[in-house]
Amino acid sequence: GLGISIGYHRILSHKALPISPITKKVLTVLGMFGCQGSSIFWVAMHRGYHHPHADTEKDFHSPYHGKWSAYMGWMFKLGLTDVNLKYAIDLLKDPFQVFAHKHHYKIIWLTVIAVALIDIRLALYGMIIPMTLAMHQENLVDLFGHTPSSGYRNFDTSDWSTNVPVLGFLCWGQGWHNNHHARPAAFDFGTGVSGKWWEFDPCRLFKPFLK
């Protein structure tokens, strides 16, 4: 979950915080295990389609296309050729990111298999279940974070983004989604944007350690 919310989203997509190359690699690998594709694919989709065209036909995982499509359907119908990777041109210049893009499925499966050979319970409780939770975490935000009736809005943005408190607390701050769409480059999606003390973004606890 942190790999997606901090790594893929805040650092790689929005460059919300300068970090070291080693930390960026670690977050990329963690994000890979969030099961939403490679960093290059995720960032290109987020930068090129989600933010500039939020809640329009060009936004692949918006409720604009239906609730199921926003939640899980986009993962089954969207292929690599549907996303122009030029929107992640900076990552395409990074050999590590390119390697992770080409081999992320192999890395995931080989790691899970290797851990399962050590102890199947470790693979189940230490990898498979957390990976599944991370995937659903993001999908819940895609759905409810863009369903206005699910929450409230602090900012009059041009999209349907909304703040959903339960997802703000449980999904590493991603649920403060209207705040994020109002200020995409902010690291803290909660109080850091709105000034409301109770809009707590758990990711801000990790900020001092990201160097």
Image (cartoon, helix red, strand yellow):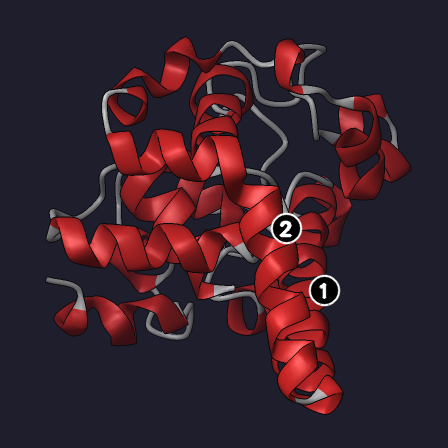
Q: Secondary structure at mark 2?
A: loop
Q: Quadrant of residue 62?
A: top right
Q: Position of residue 207 (x, y in %)?
A: 20, 67
Other-residue count near label 2 (Cα within 10 Å), few / some / many at <14 / 14–19 / ≥20: many
Q: Amino acid at mark 2?
A: Cys
- Quick check: can you spot residue 162? no
Q: Residue at x 86, y 37 (%)?
A: 67
Between 204 and 83, the residue placed more toward the observer is 83
- Quick check: can you spot residue 198? yes
In this rendering, would 67 be left or right of 57? Answer: right
In this rendering, would 127 be left or right of 46? Answer: right
Q: Residue at x 73, y 41 (%)?
A: 147
Q: Position of residue 2 (x, y in %)?
A: 44, 64
Between 183 and 97, the residue placed more toward the observer is 97
Judge whether 104 appears above or below 4 on screen: above
Judge whether 83 appears above or below 68 on screen: above
Q: Quadrant of residue 36?
A: top right
Q: Amino acid at mark 1?
A: Thr
Contact (CB < 8 A) between labels 1 and 2? yes
Between the C-alphas of marks 1 and 2, the distance is 8 Å
Q: Secondary structure at mark 1?
A: helix
Q: Which mark is residue 35?
A: 2
Q: Position of residue 114 (x, y in %)?
A: 61, 72
In this rendering, would 73 be left or right of 109? Answer: right
Q: Residue at x 34, y 57 (%)?
A: 27
Judge whether 45 appears above or below 125 on screen: above
Q: Which mark is residue 132?
A: 1
Question: What quarter of the picture does the C terminus occupy?
Answer: bottom left
Q: Position of residue 102 (x, y in %)?
A: 50, 30
